Image: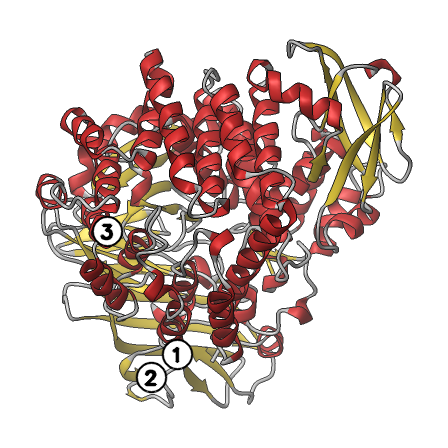
């Protein structure tokens, strides 16, 4: 039973001043136990309410068996002030929705993480599981003797095997967290003038087997953490709201990271086996800054209901790229233009698109709201906020943000509150801007035409845009640049006459770009010579979008990469663009055309490797490993490769080509968690009918953990194997739908992502019909969204191919 908006509103009127004291015992490997006392006020004595608690056994409330249906504990005849003590045992899980237990295959060590989110806290402890009923938490945890325990509150003391943490400020249940295990820790005192003693305890933590990787990366991780903290504590008027700041790489987390107050959890995959590539570094820097932004925007001030989740995620996503770039001394907007922003355009092209700022009534329950944690809320919201900052100016934007934060510390706020704060900080009409940008769906198009030699910009859509336009000469050098406002009326650019013209050249607004024939032809020759990496990134994303809408063939995109990307020495542009080209070539090529496309991309990778450029070597080596068709060349590279991630890509590609000889030796060489998942992918990728049958069955068996399921799907639908897996493609929607019926929210999302995903252009009517049938038969809310989105992607790819013909 998913909490409804109406239930949440009634309970929020009734319940207040919540305090939670919780003790957990995670020493048993079978089930964990808790003893939780919740104190709260009731506005109407004599009323009834409920606590959420899912899947508990032996539930005792105030010393007697509970009135408990497996999901809710009834609270009757409440007093003005109440205290409820709940004791029970709960199961560990492996899907990341609740108390997640993972054993590290590298050393056999066990890690337990209390993962919460949305309405998942109720799978960890009894609580009022809605964002506008905040609670303080005083936590203690009894753990194995070799374990470290990390939690929301600052560590207080340890008595034998029990760890005690100080009481926290009030925050929402969906960001409650603790984790245990034999973590390796690197800690320091971060200078902070407002803290007692002038500093705060900071730390980075990782699984014991990841100690070499943590020590390799710690200088970078600490530098970004400290620089981001310095920025936020100077830019925001409200002090940092918690007593310490721990960051921990945890296994089995369903999200990239989670903003648990004072103790942020990151996917342990972010701590890469080998030296991270340029895009991986950019991603890590942005996530560090993203999660730290949440300490203020989300944890300190929280939305009331899930329709305003974008207030958290859009803001943090924007700050992640902006502040992460400042902290690292590089622009992360280049990586965003190639990897993040295109996901927003794709999401906005589907039938499931929705306004960034939804009406609460459109999200009547938590399951429906969960589906809105998507790339509209994250990537589009990020892009739209970047346009808002361009339109308002950073000074006015931050002034408004500070007024918002200062008005609601440790409380809840709404879109109206946020817009009121911004409106008070500027002469511009922010509310009207918000109606156009936040309350609508879709994206505008900026069209370039010519009046003689004079470029003319026209907006197809309804929103005001402010962005830079750059004019280039025939050799790609900048001749002219201008900041323009584009709205209802076309904008003529007489000073750009005869030039190659790129609107939105700094990627400041959110709009698709349709270039005129002269500019498009010119850029085909000089794209790689343009000085700005961000402009090149924008143009590569524009070329990919042209394939997706049928204005360009996948073959022409690959040819463009061969001529213009081969000499691009910016490691982020090369890696991000080559990955985007490869993904698009796979999904939008006919299966008969795919071998030639892969051969061209392997040749591109070989040429870059031959150039001896160390900054692009890792990305080029990975591109080769994903595209090569020569098994002997793959074995040769495997013989000398040192980076473990690259080695597994080589092994997986060999398996796709039918060569399983490297899988078992590599699994023995790399017995880590990431190695175990990579081995699953490689075994599922093997070009062998029996292997495919085995993994098609295991994929839908329900026996795989969240990570194992994703790895198996990645291998099962291997590159160039459309004919081999054809017998399982049409059945996959029905079988995965059955698995989704017995799975939770996050797993439902992963199951939908496990659907066959290429070549989309060849996905026939039988597969589309199977998807429709599964949807029509009824699916859980979250899985249904994923199935519908996949059907949209298939139909759009087929339509794009038909348009090109």
The residue to which callout 3 is attached is: 687
The residue to which callout 2 is attached is: 61
- Of tags 1 and 3, which is closer to the observer? 3
Q: Considering only order in the chain, which callout, 2 or 3, is on the residue closer to the N terminus?
A: 2
Within 10 angstroms of label 2, few (less than 14), some, or many (20 or more) residues? Answer: many
Left or right: residue 84 versus residue 404 is left
Where 350 falls versus 453 (above or below)? Answer: below
The residue closer to the viewer here, 666 or 566, is 566
Residue 438 x %, y % = 72, 51
Q: Considering only order in the chain, which callout, 1 or 2, is on the residue closer to the N terminus?
A: 2
Mark 3 and mark 2: Cα distance apart in space? 56 Å
Within 10 angstroms of label 3, few (less than 14), some, or many (20 or more) residues? Answer: many
Check contact, mark 2 vs mark 1: CB within 8 A. Answer: yes
Where 195 falls versus 325 (above or below)? Answer: below
Task: Report whether residue 297 is seen.
Answer: no
Mark 2 and mark 1: Cα distance apart in space? 7 Å
Residue at screen point 8% across, 41% down: 665
Residue at screen point 54% across, 50% down: 300
The residue to which callout 1 is attached is: 84
Task: Report whether residue 136 is seen.
Answer: yes
Residue 375 x %, y % = 56, 50
Residue 336 found in image quarter: top right
């Amino acid at each position: 039973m998913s909490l409804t908006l109406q239930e949440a509103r009634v309970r929020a009127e009734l319940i207040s001043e919540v305090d939670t004291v919780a003790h957990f015992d995670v020493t048993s490997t079978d089930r964990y136990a808790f003893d939780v006392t919740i104190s709260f006020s009731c506005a109407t004595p004599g009323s009834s309410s409920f606590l959420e608690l899912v899947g508990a056994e032996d539930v005792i409330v105030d010393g007697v068996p509970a009135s408990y249906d497996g999901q809710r504990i009834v609270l009757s005849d409440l007093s003005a002030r109440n205290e409820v003590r709940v004791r029970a045992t709960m199961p560990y899980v492996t899907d990341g929705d609740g108390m997640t237990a993972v054993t590290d295959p590298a050393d056999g060590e066990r890690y337990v993480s209390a993962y919460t989110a949305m309405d998942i806290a109720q799978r960890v402890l009894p609580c009022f599981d809605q964002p506008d009923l905040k609670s303080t938490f005083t936590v203690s945890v009894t753990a194995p003797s070799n374990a470290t325990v990390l939690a929301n509150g600052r560590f207080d003391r340890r008595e034998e095997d029990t760890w005690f943490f100080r009481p926290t400020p009030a925050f929402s249940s969906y960001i409650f967290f603790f984790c245990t295990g034999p973590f390796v820790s690197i800690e320091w005192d971060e200078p902070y003038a407002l803290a007692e003693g002038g500093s705060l305890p900071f730390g980075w933590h990782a699984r014991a087997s990841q100690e070499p990787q943590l020590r390799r990366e710690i200088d970078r991780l600490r530098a970004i953490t400290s620089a981001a903290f310095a920025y936020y504590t100077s830019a925001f008027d409200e002090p940092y709201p918690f007593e310490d700041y721990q960051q921990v790489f945890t296994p089995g987390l369903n999200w990239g990271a989670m903003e648990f107050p004072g103790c942020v959890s990151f996917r342990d995959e972010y701590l890469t086996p080998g030296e991270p590539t340029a895009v991986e570094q950019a991603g890590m820097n942005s996530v560090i800054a993203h999660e730290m932004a949440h300490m203020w925007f989300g944890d300190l001030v929280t939305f009331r209901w899930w329709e305003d989740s974008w207030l958290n995620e859009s803001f943090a996503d924007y700050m992640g790229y902006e502040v992460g770039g400042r902290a690292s001394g590089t622009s992360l907007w280049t990586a965003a233009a190639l990897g993040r922003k295109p996901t927003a355009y794709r999401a906005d092209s589907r039938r499931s698109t929705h306004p960034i700022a939804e009406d609460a009534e459109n999200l009547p329950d938590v399951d429906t709201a969960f589906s809105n944690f998507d790339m509209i809320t994250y990537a589009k919201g990020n892009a739209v906020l970047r346009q808002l900052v361009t339109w308002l100016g950073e000074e006015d934007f931050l002034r408004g943000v500070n007024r918002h934060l200062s008005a609601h510390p440790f409380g809840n706020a709404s879109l109206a509150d946020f817009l009121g704060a911004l409106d008070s900080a500027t002469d511009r009409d922010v509310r009207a801007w918000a109606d156009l940008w936040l309350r609508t769906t879709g994206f505008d198009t900026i069209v370039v035409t010519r009046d003689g030699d004079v470029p003319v910009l026209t907006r197809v859509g309804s929103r005001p845009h402010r962005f830079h336009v750059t004019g280039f000469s025939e050799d790609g050098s900048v001749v002219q640049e201008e900041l323009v406002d584009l709205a209802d009326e076309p904008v003529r650019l007489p000073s750009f006459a005869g030039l190659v013209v790129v609107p939105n050249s700094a990627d400041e607004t959110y709009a698709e770009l349709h270039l005129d024939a002269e500019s498009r032809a010119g850029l085909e020759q000089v794209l790689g010579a343009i000085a700005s990496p961000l402009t090149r990134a924008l143009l590569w994303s524009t070329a990919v979008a042209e394939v997706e809408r049928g204005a360009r063939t996948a073959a022409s995109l690959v040819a463009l990469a061969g001529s213009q990307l081969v000499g691009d020495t910016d490691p982020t542009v090369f890696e991000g663009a080559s990955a985007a080209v490869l993904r698009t070539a796979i999904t939008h090529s006919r299966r008969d055309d795919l071998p030639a496309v892969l051969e061209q991309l392997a040749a591109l990778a070989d040429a870059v490797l031959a150039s001896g450029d160390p900054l692009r070597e890792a990305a080029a080596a990975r591109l080769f490993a994903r595209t090569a068709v020569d098994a002997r060349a793959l074995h040769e590279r495997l013989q000398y490769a040192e980076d473990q991630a690259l080695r597994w890509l080589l092994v997986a590609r060999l398996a796709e080509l039918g060569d399983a000889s490297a899988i078992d030796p590599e699994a023995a060489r790399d017995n880590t968690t990431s190695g175990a998942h990579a081995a699953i992918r490689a075994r599922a990728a093997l070009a062998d009918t029996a292997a495919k049958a085995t993994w098609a069955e295991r994929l839908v068996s329900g026996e795989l953990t969240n990570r194992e399921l994703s790895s198996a799907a990645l291998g099962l639908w291997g590159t160039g194997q459309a004919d081999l897996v054809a017998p399982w493609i049409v059945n996959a929607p029905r079988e995965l739908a059955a698995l989704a019926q017995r799975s939770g929210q996050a797993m439902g999302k992963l199951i939908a992502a496990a659907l066959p995903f290429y070549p989309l252009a060849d996905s026939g009517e039988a597969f589309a019909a199977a998807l429709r049938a599964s949807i029509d038969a009824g699916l859980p809310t979250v899985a249904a969204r994923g199935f519908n989105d996949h059907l949209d992607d298939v139909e759009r790819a087929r339509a794009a191919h038909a348009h090109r013909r």
